[in-house]
Image (cartoon, rainbow, N blue to C red):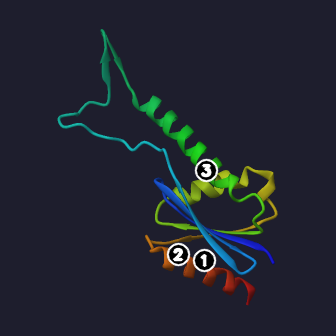
Amino acid sequence: MKREIGIWLNSTKAILVDLNNGNQSVKTIESDIESRTRFPGEGKDFSRLGSMQVNPSKKQTNRKKHQLHHYFEEIIHNLEDASNIFIFGPSQTKNLFEKELKKHHNFHNKLIAIENSDKLTQKQLIAKVKDHFEHMKS
């Protein structure tokens, strides 16, 4: 039987539901992506460094991009022998993950599906993944 994996993800965590030969397992991968924190009274997009004004947003954007790449690589490491992949979640992170997944030649011939979804309980996640793969077979 094929190994089918459903992934619910946003920028803070990914929940992998693995269906393999009638067995199911659930794994959570936490993200290390920093969120932008605003401090009270902060109004300028730059900060002072001596007499120079420095815009830290480019540095923060690059750091977030590297953290996102590391997060995706950790998820991809768990998908190595999956035959079908179902990606769903509430944010744009799922679309970014799909783009990253397509960069890996291992996943070019795998069936990948994407769907919008709200936050779900673990039982709802498992049921949604099972339902998705059942509908694919019929």
Q: Is residue 93 above or below residue 127?
A: above
Of helix, strand and loop, which one carries label 1? helix
- Mark 2: few/some/many CA within 10 Å (<14, 14-19, 20+): many
Percent position (x, y) of residue 54?
Answer: 37, 20
Q: Earlier in the sequence, mark 3 or mark 1?
A: 3
User: Hey, which quadrant is residue 128 in on the image?
Assistant: bottom right
Distance from label 2 to label 1 (Cα)? 6 Å
Q: Residue at x 65, y 75 (%)?
A: 24
Image marks 3 and 2: residues in contact by CB distance under 8 Å: no
Q: Residue furthest bottom?
A: 138
Q: Which mark is residue 129?
A: 1
Image marks 2 and 1: residues in contact by CB distance under 8 Å: yes
Of helix, strand and loop, which one carries label 3? helix
Q: Residue at x 45, y 73 (%)?
A: 120
Q: Is residue 94 above or below residue 37?
A: below
Q: In the rendered image, which quarter contains the N terminus?
A: bottom right
Q: Is residue 46 above or below residue 1?
A: above
User: Hey, which quadrant is residue 38 in on the image?
Assistant: top left
Left or right of residue 22: residue 59: left
Q: Nearer the viewer, residue 83 or 51?
A: 83
Q: Which residue is mark 3?
A: 72
Q: Which residue is mark 2?
A: 125
Percent position (x, y) of residue 48?
Answer: 30, 17
Q: Amino acid at mark 1?
A: Val
Front of the two marks 3 and 2: 2
Q: Earlier in the sequence, mark 3 or mark 2?
A: 3
